């Protein structure tokens, strides 16, 4: 079973009119491209401020479309530390993307091919609207088969992708994954996880027993000139998992200072009692994804903050200093503990 997710739609009058889109699959993307071309769109509204909203704001802006983002909060990508999200917001502003904070859309009206989105801050005109407020696992078929649904709301599976019924397997966004940091079963709908689970399910269905060893929650996206990436868990998730989290955020350069400045911010989260590394977040002009990839391996291996502070990394001035920002942030965090 690989039923994926369903895109969430807010309960707003007019939200299902032609010209209002979600972006969840290739068909959605093709429909958006056709609508943009056929209607000569020049203004777009994005409702939401997560991954899809950030990536779509760049894509639309690069097409010369004036883009406005409506967000119920104050900062984009609110999984990231506010200081890092603030850099994302600055990048949006620098690129001419309008970001409306604490926005509640009440009505979407359409006259001809033109939209009016009415919010608590006023009315905005647009030629198209994209809704990007998240997804939920599509478990309707699973429920009709009386399969067990996990606490995350996704299909419960074991480490072999087997559901609560012996000959039914599930993979991808519709099912849970074992989180190696928290020890809990979670639902994180990402394409790389789905690919791995699908392969594991196929092996087991075909008679070759293979275990899916879990995830650490690594994720990334690009926002114009920024790399944005994270792995593991944040402070709130750490507290919910029974840890006593302590964190530190350090700003530095993605390359040695002698090569010039490429701004990067790195945040590390660890458990105060055990020193175990719990999570990491990074935003920068370069090097953010590579640092998070390294820290994902550290999380996978269960390293402590002491281990992380002395990791053997590939040093070269164009890519970082002899003391990398990973080392500096880990050692600064250790001093706080």
Image (tube, rainbow, N blue to C red):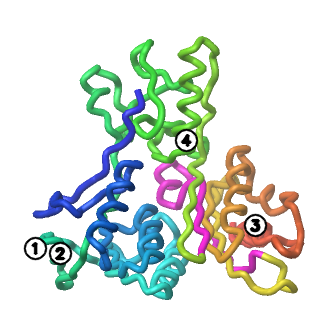
How far, Cα to Cα, is label 2 from label 1? Answer: 5 Å
The circle drawn on residue 326 is 3
- Disc 2, SS: strand
Label 1, on which residue? 111
Mark 3 or mark 4: whose residue is earlier in sequence: 4
> Residues at badges 3 and 1 in contact (C-beta under 8 Å)?
no
Mark 4 or mark 2: whose residue is earlier in sequence: 2
At 61% from the left edge and 57% from the top edge, which residue is drawn? 279
How far, Cα to Cα, is label 4 from label 1? Answer: 42 Å
Mark 4 or mark 1: whose residue is earlier in sequence: 1
Quadrant of image for the N terminus: top left
How far, Cα to Cα, is label 3 from label 1? Answer: 53 Å
Label 2, on which residue? 114
How far, Cα to Cα, is label 2 from label 3? Answer: 49 Å
Q: How crowded is mark 1: few (under 14 residues within 10 Å), some or many (20 or more)?
A: few
Q: Is residue 69 left or right of residue 220?
A: left
The reply to whether residue 150 is visible in this rendering is: no
Q: Where is residue 114 in the image (x, y as percent from the top left)?
A: 17, 75
How far, Cα to Cα, is label 4 from label 2? Answer: 39 Å
* 158 to 242, vertically: above or below: above
- Disc 3, SS: helix
Q: In which quarter of the image is residue 75?
A: bottom left
The reply to whether residue 206 is visible in this rendering is: yes
Query: From which residue to which does the magenta span run?
Result: 226-254
* 204 to 243, vertically: above or below: above
Label 4, on which residue? 193
- Disc 1, SS: strand
């Amino acid at each position: 079973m690989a039923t994926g997710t369903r895109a969430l739609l807010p309960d707003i009058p007019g939200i299902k009119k032609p010209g209002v889109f979600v972006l969840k699959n290739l068909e959605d993307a093709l429909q958006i491209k056709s609508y943009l071309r056929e209607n000569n769109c020049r203004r777009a509204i994005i409702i939401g401020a997560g991954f899809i909203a950030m990536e779509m704001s760049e894509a639309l802006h690069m097409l010369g479309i004036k883009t406005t983002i409506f967000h119920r909060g104050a900062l984009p990508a609110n999984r990231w530390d506010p200081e890092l999200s603030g850099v994302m917001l600055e990048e949006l502003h620098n690129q001419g993307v309008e970001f409306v904070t604490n926005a509640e859309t009440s009505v979407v009206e359409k006259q001809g091919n033109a939209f009016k989105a009415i919010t608590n801050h006023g009315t905005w005109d647009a030629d198209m609207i994209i809704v990007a407020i998240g997804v939920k696992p599509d478990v309707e078929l699973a429920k009709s088969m009386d399969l067990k649904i996990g606490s995350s709301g996704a299909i419960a599976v074991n480490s072999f992708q087997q559901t609560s019924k012996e000959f039914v397997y599930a993979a991808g966004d519709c099912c849970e994954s074992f989180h190696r940091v928290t020890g809990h079963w979670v639902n994180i709908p990402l394409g790389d996880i789905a690919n791995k689970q699908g392969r594991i399910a196929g092996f087991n269905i075909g008679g070759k027993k293979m275990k899916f060893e879990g995830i650490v929650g690594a994720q990334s996206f690009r926002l114009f000139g920024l790399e944005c990436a994270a792995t593991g868990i944040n402070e709130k998730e750490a507290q919910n998992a029974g840890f006593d989290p302590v964190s530190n955020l350090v700003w530095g350069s993605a390359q040695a200072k002698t090569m010039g400045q490429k701004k990067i911010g790195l945040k590390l989260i660890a458990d105060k009692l055990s020193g175990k590394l719990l999570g990491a977040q990074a935003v920068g002009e370069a090097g953010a994804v590579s640092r998070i990839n390294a820290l994902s391996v550290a999380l996978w291996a269960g390293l402590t903050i002491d281990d992380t502070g002395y990791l053997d990394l590939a040093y070269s001035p164009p890519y970082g200093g002899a003391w990398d920002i990973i080392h500096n942030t880990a050692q600064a965090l250790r001093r706080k503990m």
